[in-house]
Image: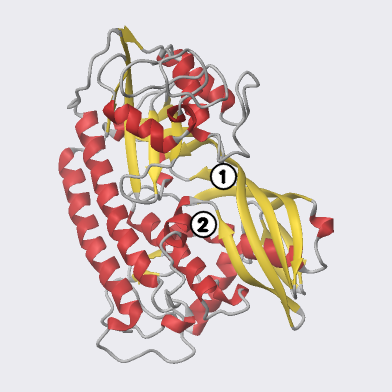
Amino acid sequence: MKHNQKRGPAVPLLLIAAAVLVLAIGIFCLVYGLASIRGNGDGPKPAEDSSAVAPPSQQEQTPESSAGVRPVTEEEKQKMADEAAGRSESPDGEETTAGGEKRTTYAGSVSGGERLQPGILDALTGFLDEFYGSQRSFASFFKTMDGIRVPDMTFWFADPDGVEAAKWQSALRYLCCAKTVNGYDLSWSECSYNLKIGEVKPVGNTFEIGFTESSEVQFSHLQGIRSVQNGLPCRAVYQKDGDEWKLVSYYREEDFFLAVNCRVTEEMTAEEIPDITVRLLTRYCSNYLKMMRNRESFNSGEVGYRTSDHPYDRQAAAAYAAQYCLARNSSYTNYDELGGNNQNYVSQVLRAGGIPNDTTGNWKWKYYGDNVDETEMKTGRTPSWIGSYYFYNYASSNYDSGLACTVGANFFAAEGGDVLMTGLEDGVYNTSYAVLDTYEEDGAVIDVLLGSNSVDRENWPLTASFAPCVSMIKIQGWKD
């Protein structure tokens, strides 16, 4: 069942074209502004106590001539910190006190927190509260008429000028700037998270903490749709700094962070890491423009795809995708602890839609058991059943019997049971999603709602995907 909202007529082509032009100008300003952050500005440097988009070590930007970015005054800095930490009035979240300072927390339950050293849990939830609070107040907080401002979270780190702080700050900058460029309101009108503390390992004078984070958010542009994300793997290393616990490093298995993290080499300095953000934003803007063109061409009826000998039972596939995006089917092996279950889940969705095993030809896709078997025998499984990379190759290259699909299809032609794939590097797609449904306004498709395993997601919007590589696979059915 499609989600429909009535908010007036569909956006005409002229307005889309105008939006594209504005976006192109925004891209120029954004990239130029970020370049200025890296010390390429020609104007005078800001005062030593000013705070802008870059971490403290990157504050050699141009105050007046930097397009899209400007220094922030001390008064604005305090206001930004208050809003990001949730210290301003908020319709949800509860006020708590940590270290004598009041803040709004978005944390719900914390399982296993009693195994942490006193003070670490407060430090961890304080860090996450600031992150969640910043995404809540995004529309008014980050997007201003005179530039893009990103909260400085480097003070949570033991070395605020170091590589680990720069890596997180650059990832946050990428997320915030990408959301600003995006034509949708991707702020969270409501949000909350739960934590499950896993392994706690003392290493010298530090504590390494593995945990998973589960959250429920309301994207502002999706009225009445709750988006769920469960079991997000995270890792934090803390050390005592005076009376406070500070982060030595932080890892988050989410696309906006992974996109930066996988591009940081051992030889890089903190000053070099912001360059990654510029490259990622350029790629993101290209993807977003493609999505806008896709949306307009689909809503105007300009689509065409391969045919099949047998139709896809899309209703059954979508129902299965919705049933198991936050659960597991015990009839299949669970690969959560064996590299991830996301492609296994998507393959099951296709099977539920009637796609049979493909055991012939150079490209195969089958599941009869757990052992790897790439022969034509009706035994074992192929890597394409559980591996996103291998499935993408199968879907791209199989033109004989078996799955009939179109790789690189129009994003907004997606229907329940179709497949979205994302990757961190060109040509390497390592995450698979099933399309649960579409979100429409007055008969026009506005967004695509996704489901996945490892990390489990339900009703996660396509427009909130920040992986550099994105591809839609339209499932038509299967051939004899």
Amino acid carrying mark 1 in the image: Val
Residue 155 x, y percent position in the rendering: 59, 77
Where disc 1 sits, the SS reads strand
> Can I make out residue 81 in this image?
yes
Amino acid carrying mark 2 in the image: Gln
* Near-viewer residue (162 or 222): 162
Report the residue at 32% width, 53% height from top.
284
Numbered disc total: 2
Residue 25 x, y percent position in the rendering: 20, 62
Spatial distance from mark 2 to mark 1, Cα to Cα?
A: 10 Å
Report the residue at 31% width, 23% height from top.
362
Taking 171 as reference, is 436 above or below it? above
Q: Which disc, if any, is residue 135? A: 2
Instruction: Tell me whether circle 2 and circle 1 mark residues in contact (CB < 8 Å).
Output: yes
Q: Which residue is denoted by mark 1 in the rendering?
A: 217
Q: Residues within 10 Å of mark 2 (few under 14, many from 20)?
A: many
Taking 402 as reference, is 142 above or below it? below
Along the polypeptide, which appears first: circle 2 or circle 1? 2
Side of 236 relative to 407 (left or right): right
Taking 195 as reference, is 262 above or below it? below
Side of 286 relative to 173 (left or right): left
